[in-house]
Image (tube, helix red, strand yellow):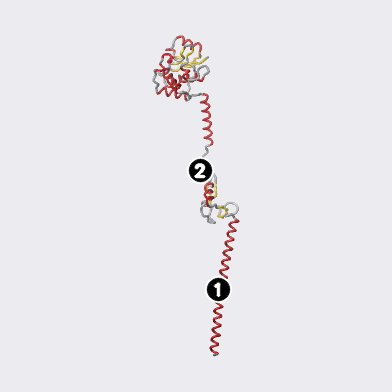
């Protein structure tokens, strides 16, 4: 009986030790897990607080600038990152510091790169100013020298040039067109081409082709069209002439009137050009 009792006591002591060891291990494991969880929460909260306090900034190594060895770089995300990638494009001659692109993950410690845009600026201000000034000058010239005319006036100008100077070179034809246009601009004559060409003062036709009918019989040549085009664009050899005459084909009394009452300017081809004294 004593032996059985001792055996039971021995077994009881071993069970208590075994149970006690198992219970101790469980307590220690629980304590370790609890501690790990607490540390994880603390680290997470600390990281979030730091990120919020720093405005989501990262720091990367600089290229050796003055001051701190780290350069603060704000990295926008989403649409803000796309917009910043466009707006941060360097202007001509400027220098910027950039880390990758605005939408990439930035590794702390990544070295920055100095980017210099060498593209030339497109400066159109001078050319546009010159163009505007040129257009203004042309507008003033056109206003002072009107060349817009009706189809009837244009056809009349072509025909009178062909009839009066069809055998002359381009300059000779331009000169006849110049005289007609000078009369249109003069206060002493009508103000349209047709009225100038068909003007009849005191029963005397101002242009003989309107008297003998040649103005309606001519076929206008390409040379005459070119001469009229040049005259309407501003080519003027006339020196202000308002009259011209071919003395070899004119009546004597007309020649005498030209020489007596008008001022001779020059002769070109078969025609001599005059203006008022």
- The image position of residue 117, as x and y in percent, is 52, 45
User: Residue 41, position in %: x, y?
Assistant: 58, 63
Q: CA distance from mark 2 to mark 1?
A: 72 Å
Label 1 belongs to which residue?
Answer: 26
SS of the residue under disc 1? helix
The residue sitting at the top extreme is: 253
Viewer-nearest of discs 2 and 1 = 1
| Mark 2: secondary structure | loop
**2 or 1: tag closer to the N-terminus:** 1
In front here: 184 or 129? 184
- Counting the numbered discs, the total is 2
For the point 45% across and 18% down, which residue is it? 268
Classify the position of the N terminus by image quarter: bottom right
| Vertical arrangement, residue 164 with respect to residue 92, above or below | above
Q: Is residue 245 or residue 96 the one in the foreground?
A: 245
Residue 67 place in picture, x, y as percent: 60, 53
Q: Is residue 45 above or below residue 86?
A: below
How crowded is the residue under tag 2: few (<14 C-alpha within 10 Å), some, or many (20+)? few
Considering depth in this image, is 125 or 47 the residue closer to the camera?
47
**On the picture, is 217 further left or further right than 130?**
left
Q: Position of residue 220 (x, y in %)?
A: 40, 21
Question: Which residue is identified by label 2?
Answer: 119
């Amino acid at each position: 009986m004593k032996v059985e009792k001792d055996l039971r006591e021995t077994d009881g002591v071993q069970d208590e030790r075994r149970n006690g060891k198992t219970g101790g291990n469980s307590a220690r494991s629980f304590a370790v897990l609890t501690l790990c969880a607490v540390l994880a929460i603390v680290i997470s909260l600390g990281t979030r607080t730091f990120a919020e306090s720093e405005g989501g900034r990262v720091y990367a190594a600089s290229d050796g600038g003055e001051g701190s060895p780290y350069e603060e770089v704000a990295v926008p995300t989403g649409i803000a990152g796309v917009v910043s990638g466009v707006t941060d494009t360097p202007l001509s001659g400027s220098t910027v510091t950039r880390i990758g692109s605005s939408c990439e993950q930035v590794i702390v410690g990544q070295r920055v790169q100095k980017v210099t845009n060498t593209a030339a600026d497109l400066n159109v201000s001078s050319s546009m100013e010159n163009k505007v000034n040129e257009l203004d000058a042309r507008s003033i010239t056109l206003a002072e020298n009107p060349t817009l005319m009706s189809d009837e006036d244009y056809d009349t100008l072509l025909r009178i040039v062909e009839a009066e100077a069809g055998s002359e070179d381009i300059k000779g034809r331009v000169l006849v067109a110049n005289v007609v246009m000078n009369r249109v601009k003069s206060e002493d004559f009508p103000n349209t081409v047709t009225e100038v060409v068909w003007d009849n003062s005191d029963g005397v036709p101002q242009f003989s082709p309107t008297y003998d009918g040649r103005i309606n019989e001519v076929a206008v040549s390409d040379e005459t069209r070119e001469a009229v085009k040049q005259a309407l664009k501003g080519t003027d050899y006339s020196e202000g002439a308002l009259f011209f005459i071919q003395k070899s084909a004119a009546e004597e009394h007309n020649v005498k009137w030209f020489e007596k009452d008008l001022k001779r300017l020059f002769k070109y081809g078969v025609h001599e050009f005059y203006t008022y004294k």
